[in-house]
């Protein structure tokens, strides 16, 4: 039986909410899970200058460390804690579960792709990277 042309995947937007009580947020990355390709990865693209304009008091060092932890959990690194040892689908579920911290994820979304790596790059470009102003 030939492989399907495109396969389903799930993704969530990683958001930074520097002051939870204010509710202001900024997209900082994407976490994507594609079961059929045995793929779970996060891609972080934090615009630090923009974030500092929104929250000049944020601890960037701590924030970078926490965002890096998301990447390491996706990779299943042994030093990323017990969650990193869970199966991929469970790690994704844990990562996208609701939280009330300065790093939160959107509700999971679904899509279809040929290649989850390319889908991840495209989602980061579309949903996280700064908007480019086009001049005529």
Image: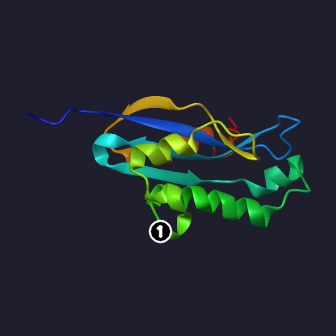
Disc 1 designates what residue? 78
Q: Is residue 132 above or below residue 66?
A: above
Could you say where residue 92 lies in the image, as x and y percent from the top left? 48, 44
Which sits in the foreground, 15 or 88?
88
Q: Is residue 30 left or right of residue 90?
A: right
The quarter of the image holding the N terminus is: top left
Could you say where residue 73 lies in the image, as x and y percent from the top left? 52, 58
Could you say where residue 130 lies in the image, as x and y percent from the top left? 69, 45
Please give the name of the residue rendered at 68% of the width and 64% of the height, measured from the top-left corner: 65
Q: Is residue 94 left or right of residue 128?
A: left
Which sits in the foreground, 82 or 39?
82
The image quarter in which residue 98 lies: top right
Could you say where residue 4 lies in the image, as x and y percent from the top left? 21, 32
Q: Is residue 62 above or below residue 103?
A: below
The quarter of the image holding the C terminus is: top right
Please give the name of the residue rendered at 48% of the width and 58% of the height, measured from the top-left corner: 84
Please give the name of the residue rendered at 45% of the width and 61% of the height, measured from the top-left corner: 76
Q: How many marks?
A: 1
Q: Label 1's element?
A: helix
Q: Residue farthest to the front? A: 82
Q: Is residue 84 left or right of residue 128?
A: left
Name the colouring of the figure: rainbow
Which sits in the foreground, 30 or 65?
65
């Amino acid at each position: 039986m030939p492989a399907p042309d495109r396969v389903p995947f799930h993704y969530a937007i990683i958001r930074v909410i520097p002051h939870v009580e204010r509710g202001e947020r900024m997209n900082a990355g994407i976490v994507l899970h594609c079961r059929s390709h045995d793929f779970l990865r996060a891609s972080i693209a934090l615009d630090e200058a923009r974030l500092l304009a929104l929250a000049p008091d944020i601890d960037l060092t701590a924030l970078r460390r926490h965002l890096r932890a998301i990447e390491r959990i996706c990779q299943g690194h042994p030093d990323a804690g017990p969650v990193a040892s869970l199966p991929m689908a469970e790690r994704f579920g844990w990562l996208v579960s609701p939280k009330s911290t300065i790093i939160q994820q959107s509700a999971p979304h679904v899509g279809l792709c040929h290649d989850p790596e390319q889908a991840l790059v495209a989602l980061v470009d579309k949903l996280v990277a700064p908007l480019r102003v086009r001049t005529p």
